[in-house]
Amino acid sequence: MTTPSPPATDRPPWWPWIILALSEPPAVYAVSAGFEELPPDDNAIKAWLEGQPGIDRAFVDRKDKTVSFVWVHAGMSLREPVTPDLRPVFAHFGYRGMTNYQESKGYPE
């Protein structure tokens, strides 16, 4: 009676090339939104944003009543990255009375 071989745990030597071929450059998303009322700081929404799937880095900055959100999303070409829509969560984090909203997406060169 022969003993079955354990499954191979090593990846084939061409594995990194598959990942490289399927990888996309990171996408940079930016949102600028104005509000009538702001929370004391932006730490909670920044932590939430950093916890979203695929987000590598997040930055939040405010000037007067306008808050800018920028994040880097590392995607794979097999799927379209899920872009967090911040509008539904603004009120939860204390951002009220949105006066304007702009978003953009770009790829670093």
Image (cartoon, helix red, strand yellow):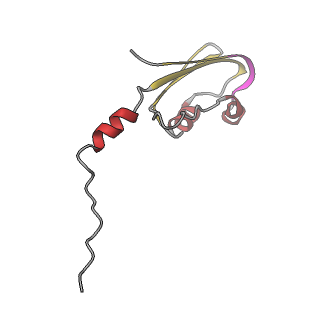
Give yes or no for residue 99 being in the magenta stretch: yes
Q: Which of the image's four quarters has the N terminus?
A: bottom left
Viewer-proximal residue, 31 or 92?
31
Magenta span of residues: 95-101
Residue at the far right: name it: 97
Q: Would residue 26 be found to the left or right of residue 11 on screen?
A: right
Give yes or no for residue 23 being in the magenta stretch: no
Q: Would residue 9 be found to the left or right of residue 65 on screen?
A: left
Which residue is rendered at x = 35% and y = 39% of the image? Answer: 19
> What x and y, as percent, mark residue 55?
48, 34
Viewer-proximal residue, 99 or 85?
85
Which residue is rendered at x = 34% and y = 39% of the image? Answer: 18
> What x and y, as percent, mark residue 33?
65, 18
Report the magenta stretch's main SS: strand
In the depicted structure, whether residue 27 falls above or below residue 10:
above
Q: Quadrant of residue 98?
A: top right
Q: Which of the image's four quarters has the C terminus?
A: top left
Q: Quadrant of residue 45?
A: top right
Q: Quadrant of residue 88?
A: top right
